[in-house]
Structure formats: structure tokens, C-alpha cells
Image (cartoon, rainbow, N blue to C red):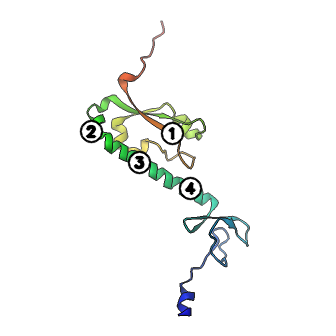
Amino acid sequence: MENMEANSQEIIICPYCKKVLDKKPKRSKKCPFCKNRIAVYKGVLYQENELFHKIREERHQKAREFMQFIIRRDREFYESDEDEYFFEFRAAPDSCNFCANMSGKKIPYKEAIRNLNLLPPFESCQDVFCRCITEMTRKKDEPKSEKGG
């Protein structure tokens, strides 16, 4: 019985130096060998930069799923006059450079539902959680441009 427990114990390895640790840390802490900070997330050990990317991808995936839900929920309303609607992006003041450059851009509704990657969160967003705001607007609600004379 004791041999089975010893065999079933997990070997814990530092994600940086790959040395075997005495026990699995429950919280983030420095490796006793290389002194790098080991990040712990949902019981898995990561290098800090790996964890940043993992959390970012999880949050972006949840946001994409939510955007898909909203589009499916409101599809009947917008498809009745789909040429009239488009998505307009607004970046928060503290957004990353990519999102700041996307601010004010408009994507036609018809194009966006065919390729949801055109909507936030953008793959190129450098933030853990994309803070872009997407508004649905109509062409007829746009201010008319004034011609100089």
C-alpha cells in the first residue's frame, strides 16, 4: 500500500530550471534553485510570462464567446436591415497601442458576422483583458460630412 502511494506521487519540476522540487507550491513563490518566481494557476506551475499569456487567452476566449452569444441573440433584429448596421470600436484611455489605433474604426455587420476575429478582443491586443467597447450603430445615425466651400 505504501509503495502505491509513493509511485502515484507527482514529480514537481521548476518551469524555469527543470529541477525537481521537494513539494508542489500552492501559491506563487521563488524556486529554491534558480530563484525565479514560479507562478501557480489552477494547480499548474508556470513561468510568469507563460501565465500572463494563458490568462490573456482564456479571457479573450470568454469575451469572444460572449460576443458570439450577443450576435446570435440579436441576429433577427439586425439581419432585417443588415446593410444599415455596423460595429464601431472605442478604446479605453488606458488601452494598448493596437486597440488605441482601432478606436473609431467601423466594421459592417454583414462582414463581422462572417469573421468574428474582426471584433474585439483582438488577437493583437497586448492587454490581459481587452478593454475595447463595441457599439452597434446605423448608417443613417452617422453625422453627415460637411463639404467645404
Give residue 15's position: percent from left, percent from top: 63, 68
For label 1, the residue is 132
Quarter holding residue 26: bottom right
Answer yes or no: do the residues labelled 3 and 4 have beta carbons within 8 Å?
no
Q: Viewed as shown, does residue 62 lie left or right of 17?
A: left
Instruction: Please rate how many residues cluster around mark 3, counting C-alpha atoms within 10 Å: few if below 14, some from 14 to 19, many from 20.
Output: few
Q: Distance of mark 2 from mark 3, alpha carbons?
A: 17 Å
Please tell me how many numbered marks the rendered image carries: 4
Reading the chain from its start, which is encountered first: label 4 or label 1?
A: 4
Instruction: Please rate how many residues cluster around mark 1, counting C-alpha atoms within 10 Å: few if below 14, some from 14 to 19, many from 20.
Output: many
Task: Depth check: give the residue in front, 1 or 83.
Answer: 1
Task: Depth check: give the residue in front, 16 or 55.
Answer: 55
For label 2, the residue is 76
For label 4, the residue is 53
Answer yes or no: do the residues labelled 2 and 1 have beta carbons within 8 Å?
no
Give residue 54's position: percent from left, percent from top: 54, 58
Q: Distance of mark 3 from mark 1, alpha carbons?
A: 14 Å
> Callout 3: helix, strand or loop?
helix
Quarter holding residue 142: top left
Task: Depth check: give the residue in front, 122 or 40.
Answer: 40
Instruction: Please rate how many residues cluster around mark 2, counting C-alpha atoms within 10 Å: few if below 14, some from 14 to 19, many from 20.
Output: few
Q: Distance of mark 4 from mark 2, alpha carbons?
A: 36 Å
Give residue 35's position: percent from left, percent from top: 73, 67
Which amino acid lies under the numbered mark 1 shown in the image of this protein? Cys
Which amino acid lies under the numbered mark 3 shown in the image of this protein? Phe
Q: Viewed as shown, does residue 69 lie left or right of 133?
A: left
Reading the chain from its start, which is encountered first: label 3 or label 1?
A: 3
Residue beneath the point at 35% across and 38% down: 111
Reading the chain from its start, which is encountered first: label 3 or label 4?
A: 4
Residue beneath the point at 48% across and 45% down: 121
